[in-house]
Amino acid sequence: MTSHDRQSRGEPGGDRLLPGSASLAVLLIVFITLALLTLFAIMRGGTGEVGSDAGGAKAYGPADFAEIDFDRELLPEVETAGSSDPEGTYRVRQSLAYEDYFPCTDCHADMDVNLERRQLEEMHDDILLDHGPKERWCFDCHNPDDRDSLRLANGSLIGFDESYRLCGQCHGTIFRDWREGIHGRREGYWNGAKSYLLCAHCHNPHAPRFQAIEPLPPPVRPQFLRVEAEEVNDE
Amino acid sequence: MNDADHNRPTAGDGIDRLTDRRSLLISTGLTAMAAVSASVAGASTGFVERMLRTRFTELSPERKAEILADLERDYSERYAREVTVADTPPMDGVEFAYGLDIARCVGCRRCVYACVHENNQSRDPQIHWIRVLRMEKERGIELAESTAYYEPELVPEPDAFYLPVACQQCRNPACVKVCPVKATWQEPDGIVVIDSDWCIGCRCCLSACPYGARHFNWAEPTIPSAEINPDTHYLGNRPRPKGIVEKCTFCIQRTRKGRYPACVEICPVGARKFGNLLDETSEMRYLMREKRVFVLKEELNTRPRFYYFYAT
């Protein structure tokens, strides 16, 4: 309105400093277009940026993942000891790969020891050795004389249930953290009994890198959440 | 008053108008109260009383027990199974703290859904107390560039790391300061709790919290009765109504009985740690002595009890 007033006042005086009606019309058109675009964007609700495959369009709940045990049962010993036993640590009852073969002497007792480095063929050929330097070999950890035990670098023999001592020879700082409860999962009572896992429960000793796992789905994006909430209210 | 008289011309036929107006006001009020209590609380008899009670921390033990029993009856009826509501008090000499190893976290989101399962969050509309943020290794911790909606085939991705964020249980909590009705406060063991019977749903705390840790029930929360966790705490995971705010309570129903929080136990890589800050021998104290520890948005002086660390 004011621009029109100014123009009508300007014309009789011939004031060329003020914009002509043509440029004003162009400005007006630009302004209206921008306003319409903004209005349109607001009315669409701003979902434009999210592709249909971007994730976060559907809501999942814990019940959608039947394969995961969310009600984690404690070990009976941990449950019994509860908060009363701050020093109590119990190993989880979760089998390790070696238990399929144990005791190893069932087969190895009558066999000759072959110290040669070679590709295994008839037995244990599923073992892929990917643990540090290339020179690493079975008898760095396994005991050639009695296969039911493991052998530390200093020659002392330990059982398979103490394998953490073997790992701790090289991975000293991680071993210390694990002993203090900082490395690895613990379950039970923060002020009492807990269960712990052995290194080999999470890390395959022959290829120790932690294996990648499938993530659970992302949360619902707010724009999709609102639509679902409205449906609930309508019911 | 005069307006009210004019608007009600037919009410006074053959009746004393003064007494009529008074009794009408009283009876309307009572009927409204009864209607509200019947509809909102699902015909609970104690609802009006609960609305008129004093704040939770000032209740007498007898009154508290009555309220808890009342809630248990309500929930057990609604979900058709036995639901318990405890008010386990804080332990003496205990201040909780949480540690999260971001060198270990693989971003698998098991903790997010274990939390929903344990703490009775609404399934629809969905509420998650934990958000896992994906960040680029090249850029470091860059909250503005992070995303919670990553969805690769497998995690961890080679070029990313993950930062799960939930309530940081601040020692100087902005959310507690802004609450106009004091419905949220810090307990002696450090847990910031909400009394959902006292919350008015103004959402001031949502905007005050710099971590996005508080969540609002925009619609009536839905949880299938088969999925409800019946072991609840008054200040924690008991079912919440529409229109109030909720948040992480370090699994108050578990940790006050000595258990680890649900997210600690589900974590497949053992990245989550929990313990008592006042106990020299606890996992938390070891962690804070030996590791490089940091808190989120330290410059805001919120002084969180949630410590991120890099274990190498």
Image (tube, coloured by chain):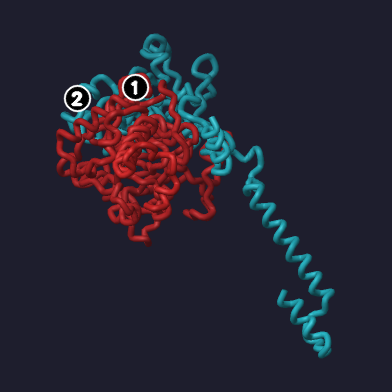
Chain colours: A cyan, B red
Same chain shared by disc 1 and disc 2: no
Q: Residue at x 24, y 31 (%)?
A: B68
- Residue at image mark 1: B77
Is B156 in front, or is B48?
B48
Amino acid identity at mark 1: Glu
Disc 2 secondary structure class: helix
The answer to whether A214 appears left or right of A22 in the picture is left
Q: Is residue B194 visible?
A: no
Q: Residue at x 82, y 76 (%)?
A: A21
Q: Residue at x 27, y 45 (%)?
A: B191
Amino acid identity at mark 2: Ala
Rendered location of residue B12, percent (x, y): 38, 40
Please tell me whether mark 1 or mark 2 is closer to you in this view: 1
Q: Is residue B160 visible?
A: yes
Residue B53 position by quadrant? top left
Residue B239 position by quadrant? top left
Residue A2 position by quadrant? bottom right
In the image, residue A5 sits, relative to residue B252, either above or below, namely below
Rendered location of residue B299, percent (x, y): 37, 62
Rendered location of residue B171, percent (x, y): 28, 53
Q: Chain of mark 2?
A: A
Rendered location of residue B50, percent (x, y): 27, 37
- Residue at image mark 2: A81
The answer to whether A155 appears left or right of B208 in the picture is left
**Is the residue marked by circle 2 packed among few (<14), some (14-19), or many (20+) residues within 10 Å?**
some
